[in-house]
């Protein structure tokens, strides 16, 4: 697969939408909406023989009628029309295709498999990389290309995480969670039936070629040649962390997965071993995937398992300490110098050993950040979990804390925060702080602890391989 | 402890705020805000010798200057003033007190313990039940009494779940999660230092006396007389499910918990056994607590572990099936009659066995609900997980589904849904459907599966004891 073609596919300078529509019921309407409202900056060429303009844009009866070069063709026409449309894309020298149309290998009718082989042959003939068929498309947040039928993906924060998924449903689940959790993403895509872009091709591209991708997340049900995937990772020689969610673990899930994407999920235990050997960290839920990807992208690297817990309320600090120890981390023992600094900052009414109850420092964000600084400088501490619950009674303090954080040096050790507040109370300040200076804000103390453990596990996993060597 | 006094405390017909304030920095300001903006319907009497009115309400120099009866006194004055204020409350025959002031047994200074004993003696003398000291207070959503310094708790949906917590921070965490997840609550409270209302007293009251409480959630760090708690449950003889989150599991967490609330958490394994023997279901995170409480309150009882998964997208259905089997549930095997009904409703391109891929029925909420109906009538199915991802492309369909659901009979088996959509796209419809007809909407397929398993575990746990016998 030519790298140049994949570059044009994922970062196109022009896009044609074959099957574009002004009718809300059609996917071609929503693809147009995604491109236009998603802020795509290159020219968009709707193709539809039954309209002069679509979404107010001049429309062509056939892609071959367009004079200009087309990098990406997004195809949303009925299955029967796809072969001829692909031939036209090939003749027009389109560099890459997103084939949204479904009804191929994934259906219980053998006719689907024949149609899919036909598409494969056409793609092979013209050397066109195709995402799909049976996909919602992809979204490139780095360059504002929303080549999917879900406009809302354009609302995801821009960042360094790329999700390569074998399921469109999972992409939607993660995309919506990403919005809620303010995960910064570079790209997300569903590979669909993987006619010629399978995990090795996509992963290889984002590992080696895409600079804006700093962390890769995979959702895998089953693939035909897992060996090829692991060889791709081995040969890539990059230090980008990879995490994976493997579905179809149970027998039943496995058989459903075969129907869904045409590949058997395979024995889960074999997968587990292979993932670990390849330095891929396995996550067990969509939320864990989002949280882990976020801290891997935002936080400084972690050097050890010794964690300090600082909390504005004792209870949530205890919960974080419990969760952390369960995950294999341990509470750091402050040096006497660090302990002295904390003792000076907090009155005797507080628990000043780890986990530190910052409750009495509540009136002063300065003090809280001074405690954080002291603990980050402690030589026995590898990372910090920083917890506080906010409501209208302490709203003013949070404003000041957000401002103070704005002016400090980036953290050299990972700091995972759990700042909880009722919706609307503090959204703007949380938004401002999240991702700044190496600070990642997660949803609950337990999830902060789990993500810190995953940061450490990813480090160990990667060290066992070629990363960070 | 007299039940009548606890009734007056938790559902007061009049409230005095001792230490009320018009100054944003004072907790007495926020308590006033909680009562006023929280919609308290009885008379409010601010008490403060340095003001004529507070929050625009006539203010008294001393509680004894108020002519009318006072059911509840909320005290937010400095620790040194508390004894005399309590004496005045006693003389005024106040029925119950919320003592927000901190600085007692929980501090490292032995003076705190002496002060706390003094309070205990005064309370004993006047027979006043006291929540606290060192508490944010309580919120009674049933009767709109927000006796806390966090106004936002009044925004929680009204429902049947009561949370009794040993930590104010945990209450805030859960309260904010409850808002996000639309958990309906009856009451929530932090017991603080438990001067005379400890877990047995509070739990006994809500088990036996409070009809609006249908499910009880406990957050326990450590208590002095756990035996008394378990005896209370045994003697209550009600069928209300109880779930518990036990913190301070690790050695370090345990010692932090002792400082925090003055009680050792104790050996976690002993706790685990005791909880199970008492028919209490243990949950392991704040989110699991919220999800489990929600399905216990909303869903029909579950009779067995055989679950059907219906999903608008195959991937998330496979994830739910995996998660479910991991938790000890299993996919039901449809009877041939049920299978025939589904086969008629779905085209052959879909996976029509369990987990069912409803993708092709996407255009028709009617069909999706018909499939749901067929599966609920299947004799081998004990519960249903129902998954769909929504975005602007299918927004109209969701409106129709919400309307259809409005007109059906309540489900006789538990139905846990995961309807995911970007914020703002479908909030209103989700809000309308959540909790209706026995349908509980949770955040992800994995959390839906976990909650279904907990519904079944709670049933088993309770059957081993006096519940549902």
Image (cartoon, coloured by chain):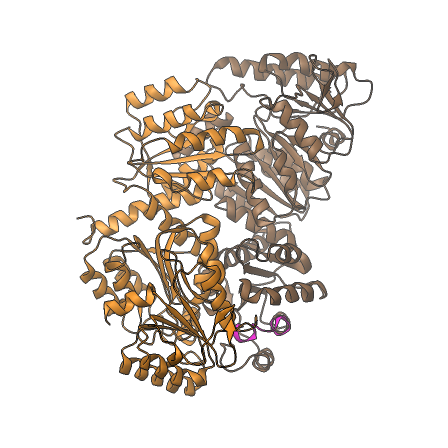
Chain colours: A orange, B brown
| Residue positioned most to the right | B67
Side of B434 relative to B224 (left or right): right
Side of B372 relative to A234 (left or right): right
- The quadrant of the picture occupied by the N terminus of chain A is bottom left
Is B36 placed above or below A177 here? above
Is B69 placed above or below B155 here? above
Residue B468 versus residue A285: which sits nearer the camera?
A285
Q: Position of residue A119 (x, y in %)?
A: 35, 82
For image coordinates 35% across by 85% down, the residue present is A118
Classified by dominant secondary structure, the portion drawn in magenta counts as helix
Q: Is-magenta flag for residue B453?
A: no
For image coordinates 44% across by 30% down, the residue present is A401
Residue B14 versus residue A270: which sits nearer the camera?
B14
Q: Is-magenta flag for residue B362?
A: yes
What's drawn in magenta, residue-wise? Answer: B359-369
Q: Quadrant of residue A435?
A: top left
For image coordinates 64% across by 66% down, the residue present is B401
| Numbered disc total | 0
**Residue A413 visible to the viewer:** yes
Q: Quadrant of residue B318?
A: bottom left
């Amino acid at each position: 697969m030519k790298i140049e073609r994949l570059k044009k596919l994922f970062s196109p300078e022009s896009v044609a939408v074959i099957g574009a529509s002004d009718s809300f019921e059609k996917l071609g309407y929503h693809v147009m909406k995604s491109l236009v409202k998603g802020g795509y900056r290159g020219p968009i060429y709707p193709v539809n023989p039954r309209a002069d303009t679509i979404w107010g844009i001049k429309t062509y009866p056939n892609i071959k009628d367009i004079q200009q070069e087309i990098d990406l063709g997004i195809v949303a026409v009925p299955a029967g029309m796809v072969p001829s449309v692909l031939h036209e894309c090939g003749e027009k020298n389109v560099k890459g295709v997103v084939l949204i149309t479904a009804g191929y290998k994934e259906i219980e009718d053998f006719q689907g498999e024949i149609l899919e082989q036909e598409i494969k042959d056409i793609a092979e003939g013209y050397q066109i990389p195709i995402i799909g068929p049976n996909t919602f498309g992809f979204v490139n947040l780095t360059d504002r290309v929303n080549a999917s039928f879900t406009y809302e993906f354009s609302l995801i924060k821009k960042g360094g995480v790329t999700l390569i998924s074998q399921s469109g449903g999972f992409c939607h689940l993660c995309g919506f969670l990403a919005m809620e959790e303010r995960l910064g993403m570079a790209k997300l895509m569903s590979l669909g039936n993987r006619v010629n872009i399978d995990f090795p091709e996509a992963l290889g591209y984002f590992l080696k070629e895409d600079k804006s991708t700093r962390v890769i997340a995979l959702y895998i049900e089953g693939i035909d040649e897992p060996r090829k995937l692991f060889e791709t990772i081995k040969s890539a020689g990059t230090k980008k962390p990879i995490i994976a969610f493997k579905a179809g673990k149970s027998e039943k899930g496995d058989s459903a997965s075969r129907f869904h994407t045409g590949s058997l999920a395979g024995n889960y235990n074999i997968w587990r071993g292979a993932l670990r050997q390849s330095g891929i960290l396995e996550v067990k839920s969509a939320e864990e995937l989002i949280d882990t990807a976020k801290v891997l992208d935002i936080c400084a690297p972690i050097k050890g398992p010794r964690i300090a817990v600082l909390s504005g309320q004792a209870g949530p600090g205890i919960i974080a300490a419990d969760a952390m120890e369960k995950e294999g981390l341990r509470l750091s023992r402050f040096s006497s110098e660090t302990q002295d600094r904390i003792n000076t900052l907090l009155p005797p009414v507080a628990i000043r050993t780890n986990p530190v109850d910052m409750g009495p420092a509540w009136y002063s964000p300065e003090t809280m950040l001074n405690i954080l600084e002291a603990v980050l400088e402690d030589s026995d501490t590898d990372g910090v979990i920083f917890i506080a619950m906010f409501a209208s009674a302490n709203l003013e303090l949070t404003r000041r804390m957000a401002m103070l954080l704005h002016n400090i040096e980036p953290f050299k050790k990972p700091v995972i925060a759990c700042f909880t507040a009722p919706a609307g109370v503090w959204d703007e300040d949380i938004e401002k702080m999240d991702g700044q200076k190496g600070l990642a804000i997660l949803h609950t103390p337990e999830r902060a602890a789990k993500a810190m453990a995953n940061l450490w596990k990813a480090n160990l996993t990667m060290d066992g391989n070629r990363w960070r060597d």
